[in-house]
Amino acid sequence: MGAISIVLLFILIVLGVPILIAIFIYNRLVTLRNRSENAWHQIDVQLQKRADLVPNLVETVKGYAAHEKTVFQEVTKARSIYSQAGTVQEKADATNMLTSALKTLFAVVENYPELKANQNFLLLQEELSGIESKIAYARQFYNDVVMSLNNTQQVFPSNIVANIFGFKPREYFEIEETKREAPQVDFK
Amino acid sequence: MIYEEISANKRKSFLLLFLFVVFLLFLGWVFGQAYGSGGVGVLVALLIALFISLITFYGGDKMVLGISHAKPVDRKENPYLANVVEGLAIAAGVPAPRAYIIEDSAPNAFATGRSPENSAIAVTTGLLDKLNRLELEGVIGHEMSHIKNYDIRYATLVVLLVGTVALLSDWMRRSFFYRGRRSRKGGAGGGIIILLALLLAILAPIVAQLIRLAISRQREYLADANGAHLTRYPEGLASALEKISKDKELLEVANKATAHLYIINPLLEHRGKLNDLFSTHPPVKDRIKRLRSM
């Protein structure tokens, strides 16, 4: 009698403890997956805001520099490629393209002092640099979350749980690093 | 390395708060003993702490902002500040706090509120004028860390506990006059208890103040570390601290009660002293050195 209950208890522990650990790991994986989903959404919102700002920016610059057609074409093209991008990688590529197109646009703006003093343009410029720093911060947050998600999926013993329930590693959001320096125009 | 610092700081702060509560209850007990019932004293101390906490918990941020003459600004009025605040909220993974501006040319900033969902950051117009974007991001990152770590709630609670101790011992000191006139009930044991109560009545406010200061000094280092981690650019905050501490202008809206909230002690006489036991902030030079060695 005593021996039987000891054996039962032993079986219970041998089965029960791994199950409890597995539940704990599974919940952590789900939490991290949801968090990374949410973090990706943050990036997406900011990328969309930036794309929405482009037509307005192009209009304003056109008012002063109508003949710089190639620049406008480049920016508009980058924007339309962005709006068709779906996956993380596609969006990253389109973002890089839009970034370099906008860089050219702002280089052109340097030749038009009147435009640089335009109130509407200054506002758009502040809006754009605000969004760009938000993209950088959202990306930083997203990549941190993705790292802990991917780590959890790869280390033992949570890799077993991740395999059983088909968790997939997430892609990092890699875009060109913008250099950390104070912007030349300080708009207040 | 930053993560270790964070958890070590959290542990120490929790220990300090715990000691503080034990100290408060012990104080209640001793005072109660002097009157004949330690249990009643503990209960009264607990009830008083609870009562004041509830009031300030839900209105503390408005009180602080009101005292400091901070005005709310939306993104139309100041897109620059709104963008920086929103950006760092994204980096910290918290909802964007409300932004406030204090009309004062002395550069300084603070955060208040009771949770990341219900928080505010106030900056002076001097801060906006004198810092560049990266420095401002450093300062807002520091404040965002105070919010994310629940320092804002913590600071309010600690202020309350200190206030309660002061209230209790003040009450005690006064009541000795009345008690002295009446006849003694206890023997020699009662006399020792009364002596102890008297001693505590004098020491309590001092000890309470010291604990409060120790807590907020550690929190500043932690917020510096976390803030630098958010911006991934410690130099921004370091150079901002340098500019703010070198500024000789006086922040008129700050007083002794709100001084510990600001990123750098706005009361100029406290800035020079190194490791001053009565200062709410660690020495600025030390903070800058730590940031630059990250």
Image (tube, coloured by chain):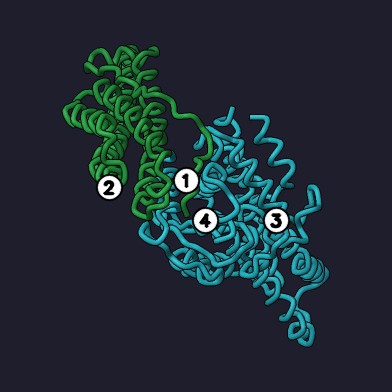
Residue B51 seen anywhere in this rendered image of the structure: no
Q: Which residue carries the number 1 mark?
A: B148
Q: Which residue carries the number 3 mark?
A: B247
Task: Name the amino acid type tagged 3.
Answer: Asp
In front: A107, or A7? A107
Task: Name the amino acid type tagged 2.
Answer: Gly
Numbered mark located on residue A61 in the image = none
> Residue A139 appears at what percent x and percent y?
37, 31
Q: Is residue B48 above or below residue B131?
A: below
Mark 3 vs mark 2: tell me if same chain.
no
Q: Are marks 2 and 1 in contact (CB under 8 Å)?
A: no
In front: B138, or B29? B138
Query: Label 1 lies in what chain?
Result: B
Query: Label 2 lies in what chain?
Result: A
Real-space Cα distance between discs 2 and 1? 44 Å
Q: In this view, does B246 lie to the left or right of A103?
A: right
Quadrant position of residue B196:
bottom right
Query: Which color is chain B depicted in?
Result: cyan
Q: Of callouts 3 and 4, which one flags the residue occurring earlier in the amino acid sequence? A: 4
> Label 4's element?
strand
Query: Which color is chain A depicted in?
Result: green
Which residue is drawn at the image coordinates 79% and 83% (left, top)? B180
In front: B283, or A30? B283
Quadrant position of residue B26:
bottom right
Which residue is drawn at the image coordinates 75% and 69% (left, top)? B201
> Label 3's element?
loop
Mark 1 vs mark 4: tell me if same chain.
yes
Q: Which residue carries the number 2 mark?
A: A63
Q: Is residue B1 left or right of residue A42?
A: right
Q: Which residue carries the number 4 mark?
A: B111
Query: Label 4 lies in what chain?
Result: B
